[in-house]
C-alpha cells in the first residue's frame, strides 16, 4: 500500500481529524511563531492554513489543489504555498487575513514539483517544474514580483531530470538543486525510467549558468531533499528505487570545495530507513543535522562534522523537520508534533500543542 493511502486510512481509523501536508514558517517580527501549512480534510478538500504553535488558528482557506512546501516573502507579509507534484497551481496568500492574493499557474506542458525559493531582494521567485513535452526535463520557472503578485518572465534549465528541491547557497546568488533523475509525464507520478535514472546534485548561478554537476554511485538513488549550513555544507537525502535488499547510502554530504560523498551513518540506521529518507534540516550554530525516515518510523540527529549520532528516536511516520533556536521541530504523519532542545548533550523532547495527524515531509522557518 502506498504511504499516503496507508496514512489516510490510519488517520481515519484513529480519528485524528483533518489530514494535512505542510511546511513550517516562523513569521518574522511576531511574538509568537506562526505555523504555515497545507491541509486536507477527510472529505479530500484542500486548505492553506496558519497556526500559532499553541494551537490557535490564524486562518484556514480552501484552495483547489494540494500544496507541499511553503516559502515566505522576505519583505512582505505573504507566503507562497507551492503545489505538490504534479500540480499546476500554487497560491500566494496574505499571512494576516488568509486571503489568496494570486493563483500561480504553470504554462502548458509544465507542472510544479513542490518547491520554490524567493531571492533575498524579494523581486524574483524560482519554482521547480517538470517539462512534460520532454518528460522529466527539469525547469525553473522564474517569476517577477509586481504589485504583490508574481508574473512569470522566463524559465531556466536545472541541468538535469526530475527536479525536486532547490535552496540558496550562502552567497544568496547561487542555487543548489536536487535533480531526482526520474521522468514522469503530465498528471502522473508514475516513474518511466527506473532502469535509466539520472539523479544529480547541481550548483548553478541564478542566471542559469552551470557551476558543477555531481553524481552518487548508484543511478537508482534519487536525490530529493536538501539542507545547507551557513558555511556552505550541503546535506542531500535520497529515496532509493532499486531492490529493497540493496545496501545503498541514503544521506550524502558536500562540504565546501570537496566532492559529493555519502555521510557516515551506521548500517543499522541505514537499514531501518527502508530505502526512504524524507525531510532534512541543518542547525548551523549547533553544527547538527536532523532527518526524518517515515518508512522506518525514525527521527535522527547527527553531528554535522563528526557524524556522531546525537539522537535515534522512534517516531511514527516522522515527517517535516526544521531548525529552531535551540534545536529542531519534527512533525508526524500519524501523531503529535515534537520539539527537541539540543543545547544539552542529550536532546530533550517536548510534545507541541498542535493538531495531530498527516503532516507532509517538509518544514521551513523564515
Image (cartoon, grey):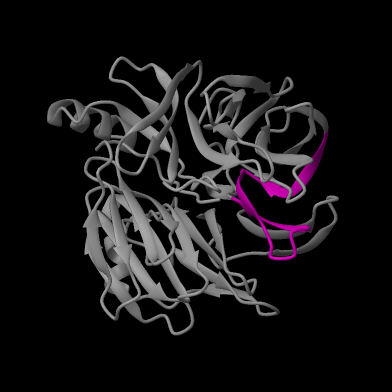
From the viewer's side, name the closer residue of 347 and 169. Answer: 347
Which residue appears farthest toward the left when viewing the image? Answer: 14
| Residue lying at 61% horizontally and 23% vertically, measured from the top left | 88
Give the residues in magenta: 154-179
38 up-or-down from 286: above or below: above
The residue depicted at 54 percent of the width and 31 percent of the height is 95
**Secondary structure that dominates the magenta span:** strand
Please tell me whether residue 169 belongs to the stretch shown in magenta. yes
Give left or right: position of 121 versus 337.
right
Task: Confirm whether the magenta stretch covers residue 216.
Answer: no
187 or 294, which lies in front?
A: 294
Q: Is residue 100 above or below residue 259?
A: above
Q: Eyeballing the image, is 160 above or below 90?
A: below
Q: Is residue 35 left or right of residue 171?
A: left
| Quarter where residue 175 is shown | bottom right
Q: How many labels does the image show?
A: 0
Residue 176 in percent (x, y) is at: 68, 58
Give the residue at the far front of this rendering. 31
Residue 139 in sight from this viewpoint: no
Q: Which of the 4 quarters of the picture holds residue 21? A: top left
**Residue shown at 56%/58% (left/top)?**
219
| Residue 283 visible in the picture | yes
| Residue in the image at 47% along x and 60% along y | 281
Residue 317 drawn at (x, y percent) = 27, 47
Q: Quadrant of the N terminus?
A: top left
User: Residue 252 placed where, x, y %?
Assistant: 51, 68
Locate residue 336, reporting x and y percent. Answer: 23, 45
In the image, taking residue 136 as reference, residue 158 lies left or right, namely right
Residue 251 higher or lower than 20, as above or below = below
Amino acid at each position: 500500500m502506498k504511504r499516503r493511502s496507508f496514512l489516510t486510512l490510519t488517520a481515519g481509523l484513529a480519528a485524528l481529524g483533518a489530514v494535512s501536508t505542510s511546511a513550517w514558517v516562523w513569521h518574522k517580527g511576531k511574538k509568537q511563531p506562526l505555523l504555515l501549512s497545507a491541509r486536507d480534510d477527510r472529505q479530500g478538500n484542500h486548505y492553506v492554513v496558519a497556526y500559532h504553535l499553541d494551537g490557535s488558528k490564524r486562518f484556514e482557506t480552501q484552495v483547489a489543489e494540494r500544496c507541499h512546501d511553503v516559502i515566505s516573502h522576505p519583505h512582505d507579509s505573504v507566503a507562497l504555498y507551492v503545489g505538490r507534484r504534479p500540480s499546476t497551481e500554487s497560491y500566494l496568500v496574505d499571512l494576516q487575513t488568509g486571503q489568496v492574493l494570486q493563483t500561480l499557474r504553470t504554462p502548458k506542458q509544465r507542472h510544479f514539483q513542490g518547491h520554490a525559493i524567493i531571492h533575498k531582494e524579494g523581486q524574483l521567485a524560482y519554482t521547480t517544474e517538470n517539462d512534460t513535452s520532454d518528460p522529466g526535463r527539469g525547469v525553473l520557472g522564474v517569476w517577477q514580483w509586481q504589485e504583490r503578485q508574481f508574473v512569470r518572465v522566463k524559465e531556466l534549465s536545472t541541468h538535469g531530470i526530475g527536479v525536486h528541491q532547490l535552496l540558496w547557497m550562502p552567497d544568496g546568488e547561487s542555487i543548489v538543486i536536487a535533480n531526482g533523475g526520474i521522468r514522469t509525464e503530465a498528471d502522473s507520478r508514475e516513474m518511466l525510467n527506473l532502469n535509466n535514472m539520472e539523479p544529480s546534485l547541481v550548483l548553478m548561478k541564478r542566471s542559469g549558468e552551470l557551476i558543477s554537476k555531481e553524481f552518487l554511485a548508484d543511478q537508482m538513488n534519487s536525490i530529493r531533499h536538501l539542507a545547507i549550513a551557513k558555511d556552505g555544507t550541503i546535506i542531500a537525502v535520497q529515496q532509493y528505487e532499486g531492490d529493497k535488499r540493496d545496501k545503498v547510502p541514503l544521506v550524502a554530504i558536500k562540504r565546501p570545495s570537496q566532492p559529493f560523498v555519502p555521510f557516515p551513518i551506521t548500517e543499522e540506521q541505514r537499514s531501518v530507513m527502508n530505502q526512504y529518507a524524507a525531510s532534512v534540516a541543518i542547525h548551523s550554530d549547533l553544527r547538527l543535522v536532523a532527518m526524518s525516515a517515515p518508512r522506518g518510523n525514525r527521527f535522527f540527529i547527527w553531528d554535522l562534522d563528526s557524524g556522531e549520532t546525537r539522537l535515534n528516536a522512534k517516531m511514527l511516520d516522522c515527517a517535516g523537520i526544521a531548525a529552531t533556536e535551540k534545536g529542531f521541530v519534527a512533525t508526524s504523519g500519524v501523531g503529535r508534533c515534537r520539539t527537541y532542545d539540543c543545547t544539552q548533550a542529550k536532546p530533550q523532547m517536548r510534545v507541541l500543542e498542535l493538531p495531530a495527524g498527516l503532516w507532509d515531509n517538509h518544514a521551513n522557518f523564515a
